[in-house]
Image (spheres, grey):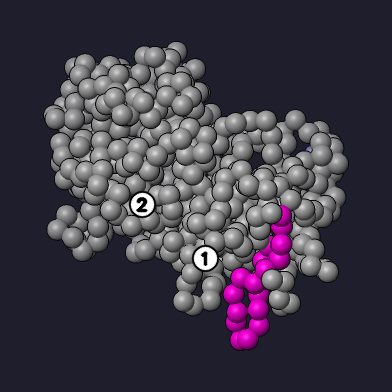
Amino acid sequence: MQEVAVIGVGMHRFGKTGDDIVGTKSVGSLCRTAVDAALKDAGVNWKQIQAVAAASSRFSGGKGWGLNGNDVVEDLGSTGIPVYNMSAGCAAGGNAFNVGYSMVAGGVYDMMLVVGGEVMPKGMIQTSGVEEATDPEFLRQRCIGMPGPSFWSTLARRRMFEYGTTEEQFSQVAVKARKCSVHNPMARFQKEITVEDVMNSPYVSNPLRLFQICPVSNGAAAAIICSKEYAKKFTSKPITVASSTVATMTFNDMLPRGLADPMTECANLHTEAQNAVANAFEKSGIGPGDVSFTELQDNTCYYELAFPEEWGLCEAGESESLLMAGETTPTGRMPINPSGGFVSFGEATTAMGVFQIAELTWQLRGQAGGRQVPDAKVGLAQTLGLGGNATAAILKR
Amino acid sequence: MSESGLPCVEGLFSAEDGVATLHGSKCTGCNTPYFPRSEACHNPDCTGSNIVDFDFGGSGTLWSYSVADFPPPPPHKFDKPFAPYAIGVVDMECGLRLIGQMVDKAEDVKVDAKVELVIDTLYHEDDVAYSSWKFKQI
Ligand SMILES: [Zn+2]
């Protein structure tokens, strides 16, 4: 295995179809901007890229929308290089990064592009679209009717019951996130909001309100990775990938993803995420106490409170007090999502895992401006995708 | 409550004499229940995956719930105008953590409440009532 480095990252600012940011741009156009920026950042030209790991949703939704890595290659110049299209729901970006990392670490390629981008369909994300009794998503919608946010509000409600978490505390997470986003030129939302603003936004799925969950966005992110040895040609300050992992959920998981789940003694509700993060710690020899900051998948504010506890970044039930004391801000003891997170970006599904790599890289280089985590040395990233997929990555300088 | 009609999906559940029965399966090797039926046991420590039919009903404890404040996307079907409802996640006595709509109004639902399984109307189509399993606080 050879050490792997990130030498360039780029992004297209996130936005919503029809707005001034992304307008009617295609996913190819968004990716082009992100890839060009990453190549420029790395000081690499397109012909030096030997393979592409793309976070692809084209064939997973069956609707013809989403990214297909082959289109990115054609757009940048049909060099004939291999493209690996990775499909793992919202974890696809993290999955693509892991495939790129693994291939470079294994010596298959010296330099790869990892890219994810999305132009999201309007409205709530529909899953399979098929009407068959063998399809768990069909059963869930026909027999029960669970809008997407309901999965998250069930978790939030349970946390309120167990720890006495208040709606104002969920709101404070959004307030903190949006305070960071003011300093992030790539974020879709860049304005501060107050607890009152959040509490005045309508319930999407009680107890969660509109400003406490991430909307869908259009956007793209790219990263150029290469072997540490190869990186010396391009930069004197590469960011090292300490570990990159992919995991699925384990049998003892206690969060039903379909209609029902066998009950076990396991208290963990997202074993896929815990597995990915625990493996990332183990493989890197880096522990929770060494992490300078974390970029985690905050589809809803709930995750900013639950995940750090589930991964050992803090004690169970401690998140609310850390939040209220400002310890999860970039200058606090346990900075979470200094980028502004999904709540400030919205989710462009397949871009998210790569968006996190870009933020980690900027933070570790000290280029994050007003949202900079002081003296950031180690960053942890995590994604979570439909179907029990999760990824984690630890980057260090 | 148990307005007679058709199940929204065939074969998953039935209601006789007002008693709700869900049709799942169970592994005789490790005693793990599944709903809907599973063709194989998912337990990696189970060496004797042997799946048999398993009917269940009865009661449980509400682990948590959410509220559908807006209509879910298709293929969900509902009677218009849309009325918000609660969705319960229940730890059933049979060993399954099961999801289902609540019969009770959202503002009356309480985490940790005892609930029982019922079969209730979900929506109407061409004057036919289609039903599903739901939970009712006891
Ligand atoms: Zn078994």
Q: Quadrant of the N terminus of chain A?
A: top left
Q: Amino acid at mark 1?
A: Gly
Q: CA distance from mark 2 to mark 1?
A: 27 Å
Give x and y (percent) for residue A187: 21, 44
Residue A370 sits in quarter: top left
Give x and y (percent) for residue A107: 42, 24
Mark in front: 2 vs 1 = 2
Q: In the image shown, does A357 or A188 lie closer to the viewer?
A: A188
Q: Are marks 2 and 1 in contact (CB under 8 Å)?
A: no
Q: Residue at x 40, y 27 (%)?
A: A319
Q: Which residue is labeled 2 in the image?
A: A209
* Magenta highlight: main SS: strand
Magenta extent: B116-133
N-terminal of the pair, mark 2 or mark 1, is 1
Chain under label 1? Answer: A
Instruction: State yes or no: Cβ of the residue under disc 2 lies below 8 Å from any atom of ligand 1.
Output: no
Q: Amino acid at mark 2?
A: Arg
Please determine whether, in this image, residue A98 is positioned above or below residue B37.
Answer: above
Q: Which residue is labeled 1 in the image?
A: A129
Give x and y (percent) for residue A268: 57, 32
Give x and y (percent) for residue A6: 29, 27
Q: Is residue A254 visible?
A: yes
Residue A271 falls left or right of residue A371: right
Q: Residue at x 42, y 46 (%)?
A: A90
Residue B15 falls left or right of residue A34: right
Q: Quadrant of the C terminus of chain A?
A: top left
Ligand 1, by image quadrant, is top right
Label 2 environment density (alpha carbons within 10 Å; few <14, some 14–19, many ≥20)? many
Question: Magenta includes B123?
Answer: yes
Question: Magenta includes A58?
Answer: no
Q: In the image shown, does B60 or A290 lie closer to the viewer?
A: B60
